[in-house]
Image (cartoon, coloured by chain):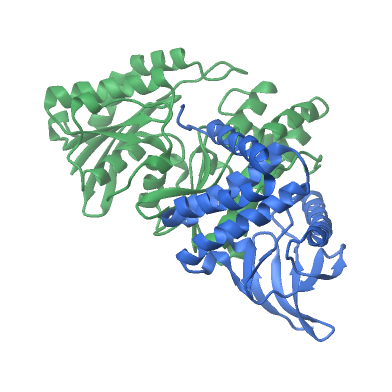
Amino acid sequence: MLGLGIESTAHTFSCAIIEKKGKQGRILSDVRKIYRPAKGEGIHPREASRHHIENSSSVLFECLREANITIKDLDLISYAAGPGLGPCLRVGAVVARSLASFYKIPIYPINHAIGHIELGKLLTDATNPLVLLVSGGHTMLLAFLNKQWRVFGETLDITLGQLLDQFGRSIGFASPCGKNIEELASTSSNYISLPYSVKGNDVSFSGLLSATKSVAKKSKVDACYSLQETAFAMISEVVERALSFTSKKELLIVGGVAANKRLSEMLHDVCKRHGCKFFAVPLQYAGDCGSQICWTGLLESQVKRGVLLKDTLVTQSWRLDSVKVDY
Amino acid sequence: MLMKLRKKGAEADIYQSKWQNSKAILKIRKIKNYRDPSLDSKIRKQRTIKESQIISLVKSFGIPTPLVYFVNLEKAIIVMQEIPGKPVHDLPESKIIELSKEIGKLVGTLHKNGVMHGDLTTSNFILFQNTVFVIDFGLSQNTIKPEDHAVDLRLIKEILNSAHAKIMEPAWKNFLIGYKSIVGNTNYIKITKLVSDIESRGRYAAVT
């Protein structure tokens, strides 16, 4: 089976082709173009969608060329139908719909967050993991139970990705700021006390964000160090809570913030403490990409025949714990 | 003293111990090397203080909790009475539904007396000789703010929704009946409204 996946939920427009044989998947191509807002600014939905429109045909063309196939070879097309920014989501949906209706190929709307998890499972050896999904859009702890991903903990306000980006932008970095913050943080070890807010299995980052901004007025370096230490310690604690509560023996970390080395170092230690295996999605596939959408579509095709064109909508707010997983 | 590890919890290890010839539990918040040392010691100390204080305080208004025998703040150790029952989490589903009402009453009593538990999971209620004991007060706080009480309710709802998904509805309903019977109708309405508010602030929550 050959699938094409289209991702356009936020700043990334990406197309990918995966070949599925039984339970195995091989990524033949994964091409991305990323919208970069100006320094200190966040993502502008209209500008981002413009960027996606301008780049959509070249990304698609490149992705087919790299995989060395034509559109007619495709067995299915999937697109990210949410959650995400409306204007951006629509670009991917339009591309998918046009191809599907012109070439008469089955089409699958995919939940972007489920895509992160499924791709993580494909690319690691995790079989029944507790999943930590950390990105710009999500901060969630999940375990699979009874045909659905269940939320064992999440952020009560902003996500870990937003925390890093909003702070980073306030000191003049360009989004995504995670890497810059990590670099600055590694030059300090002076911890300045910041609000640490763990509520059972949930976390709250908004107070931490404001407090870190005021620390940054004195020292940006110490602020970066203390922000990372506090936020990641909070995440590690809720991971520990969920591991001990669910008795899972595997942890899988997916999403853009999975690329942070300090976070994965801390989680490694958590796993050692709980006799649990640690898996992280490979760096190259941590961020948003077409592969996550494509692979999930291929999995869905095992049990569904695609949807009618009139049902190929986009949904800005679409929680992953509302999705039934039948494959 | 050689002690047997009973449970590696999220933030503390639980050992089987003895205190003056009676069975006891030793709870130690060990140093976590992955945390910045000053953050680590702050968290361990604060929680040891809070837990030992509140576990005793809530006894005064009738919440069954273990007796605290001994506290060592430097090492973040609490030695307390062992409750040799079973966590509600591990009981049969029909029993969990039944006990949810009692759990609701216990949480209602805590809130009514200005205490938020902070970590309401089904593992933190232990059934022993027909009495439900409440444990693990490390994240608890003295607070009369309805918002804080709502956070408590949301937590247990989240746990029912994830770990006990099959019995979520009857268990949650019973919990609310028990809770309401203690805090009264006015507070009940106020706090459950705040629970919906918190849920609607959640990421990608359905806009209603």
Q: State whether residue B61 is above or below residue A30.
A: below
Q: Residue at x 41, y 53 (%)?
A: A144
Give percent across and percent down for residue A79. 30, 31
Q: Chain A's colour? A: green
Q: Residue at x 50, y 55 (%)?
A: B171
Q: Is residue A85 left or right of residue A212?
A: left
Q: Residue at x 43, y 29 (%)?
A: A317
Q: Is residue B196 left or right of residue A94?
A: right
Q: Is residue B5 left or right of residue A84?
A: right
Can you tell which quarter of the image residue A54 is in? Answer: top left
Give percent across and percent down for residue A171. 70, 23
Q: State whether residue A298 is above or below residue B88.
A: above
Can you tell which quarter of the image residue B83 is in? Answer: bottom right
Q: Which chain is blue in the rendering?
A: B
Of B180 and B13, nearer the camera is B180
Can you tell which quarter of the image residue A83 is in? Answer: top left
Q: State whether residue A24 is above or below residue A35.
A: below
